[in-house]
Image (spheres, helix red, strand yellow):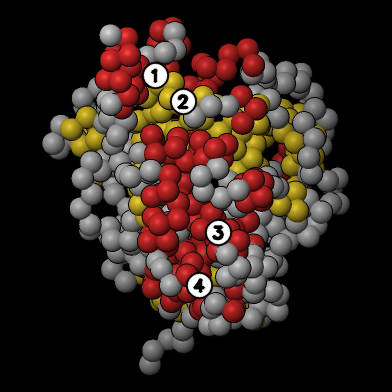
Amino acid sequence: MRRLLIALLVGLPGLASTARAQAPADTTTRIVDRLFRAYADTHSPGCALAISRNGELLYERGYGMANLETGTPITPGSIFHMASVSKQFTAMAILLLERDGKLSLDDDIRKYFPEIPDYGHTITIRHLLHHTSGLRDQWNLLALARGRFEENRITTADVLDIIPRQKALNFAPGAEYLYSNTGYTLAAVIVQKVSGQSLRDFAHDRIFAPLGMNRTHFHDDYTMLVPGRTSAYAPIPGGWRVSIPNFDTYGATSLYSTVGDLLTWQANFDRLVVGNRTLFAEMEAPTRLTSGEVSSYGLGLSVARFRGVREVGHSGADAGYRSFTARYPDHGLAVAVACNAAPSNPTALGRGAVAAYLGDALQPVSAPPPEPRPVAVSSESLRRLAGVYLQPATLQGMVVGLRNGGLALGFESGPALIPVTENRFRVSGQPVELVFGDGTSPWVEQRPLGGGNPTRFERQLPADTAAAALAALAGEYFSEELNATYVATYANGTLAFRIGTSNPMPARPMFRDAFVVGGDLYQFTRSGNRITGYSVSNGRVRRVAFTRVPPRR
């Protein structure tokens, strides 16, 4: 009878999975369920969770709704768009082709894309996968070129059209780490050019099918029906709106999968069905930059430490989808979380679940450093330090404002600066200090308290907000790099920009000849007193050029 019962359980994998899922102590699962309480109802989108140890399922559950219109709940088998979690599979496809002898990570990408300009530096496939290529990010470029992002279908052809238009890089290849989705879209195209198969087919044949990841695929047509797929949502006042990715391009994104399939992939790093130890070691190896600094991003994977424990994983975010999966190899633990609610934080949720299972193996949560007792600084000295500062390489800005009798970051809101000396301030609630130059040195350094390299920002001249100065900037501006024309208008004291039929985007003065427009930095250029154009920069693109169009006669 005992032998018959075992045979029945083996023949019913769903029952076996349930038995394994009930193995942990109830107290542990209750802790995990409390983490997801905000998503565990029938009126909101939610998340799916799966967690395993040594390849064996510990717990899986769905929370909230897969589709608010049909009333379909999320289950562990629900399919999600996994966004940038995709990148590790694209990297594995490239590594398998290198093992096959069909390419090298050190190949010049112009071997596969001769249409990309020669920037005077060799860009390799390795640079693409390490996010050190210097290529501007495709999403930022397309958003600038179109003005509207969500309403327009985006294809790989669109990416391959805009990237060769770029006349400059963000930085010399290998000099910096700066996340760029462009590299992984190009890697997907390289897979097709080298193997003769699309990345979708190659990944299915070489990765997903051998591992039994039967509910996973690279999605190359966003109108395609996918049974079991979740919808995704972003919040609006009083409810939710649908927020679904609108692109067919993949490699950087567009992996469709379940949390269970992602754990199957995580188990492969130890059980070696696809790939080998050499490939996995290369995926997890840190990247040395030309400066000698080291980036923790490997090949499609980020290596970090979570409360003292080694963590190897990746997160993702596209439209309303959010995802996170990671391994904790020293403890045999793996987690996958996928959510269909834009405000969700699956990284925090996944790490919370990991903490419930690892318990005392984790270091205690670090307490923030005690804030120093402020010293008295004269109002004259505070006024001297207030202003706008710019990091000249990354073009990141820092606003130091006068607020409530002291200094604070930001124009209207942001953490207070606690004076430690006349020129040194602690950022309230953060392990960071700001050290200002003396009266003759217009700069400020951002210094991490726990060690690390300081970042220097240079003070900028104040903005000229006179009506005549702003009105002089109105006109048409064309970018060859985007094949797009923007119109700047001035009315009622406000400079604004629009493209096509977009709504005008107000420009907030930042410093002399520089404005913030929708989160982007617009910096005007001059020849003498004549405005010749401007450049646009943001977190992932730098100095996209616009030229002023002569007035029509």
Let me know if residue 468 appears in the view. no
Q: From the viewer's perspective, tell me whether residue 466 is left or right of residue 418.
A: left
Looking at numbered disc 1 in the image, what kind of residue is underneath it? Arg
When asked about the image quadrant of residue 377, the answer is: top right
State the SS at label 1: helix
Q: Which residue does the image show at 39% across and 39% down from the upper left?
A: 261
Q: Kindly identify which residue carries mark 1.
A: 20
State the SS at label 4: helix
State the SS at label 2: strand
Between marks 3 and 1, how big is the CA–CA gap? 33 Å
Q: Residues within 10 Å of mark 3 (few under 14, many from 20)?
A: many
Looking at numbered disc 3 in the image, what kind of residue is underneath it? Leu
Question: Looking at this rendering, what residue extends furthest in the bottom direction?
Answer: 553
Residue 251 position, x and y percent, is: 45, 59
**For the residues bearing labels 4 and 3, Cβ distance under 8 angstroms:** no
Residue 265 position, x and y percent, is: 47, 41
Per the rendering, the mark at residue 56 is 2
Looking at numbered disc 2 in the image, what kind of residue is underneath it? Glu
Q: Residues within 10 Å of mark 2 (few under 14, many from 20)?
A: some
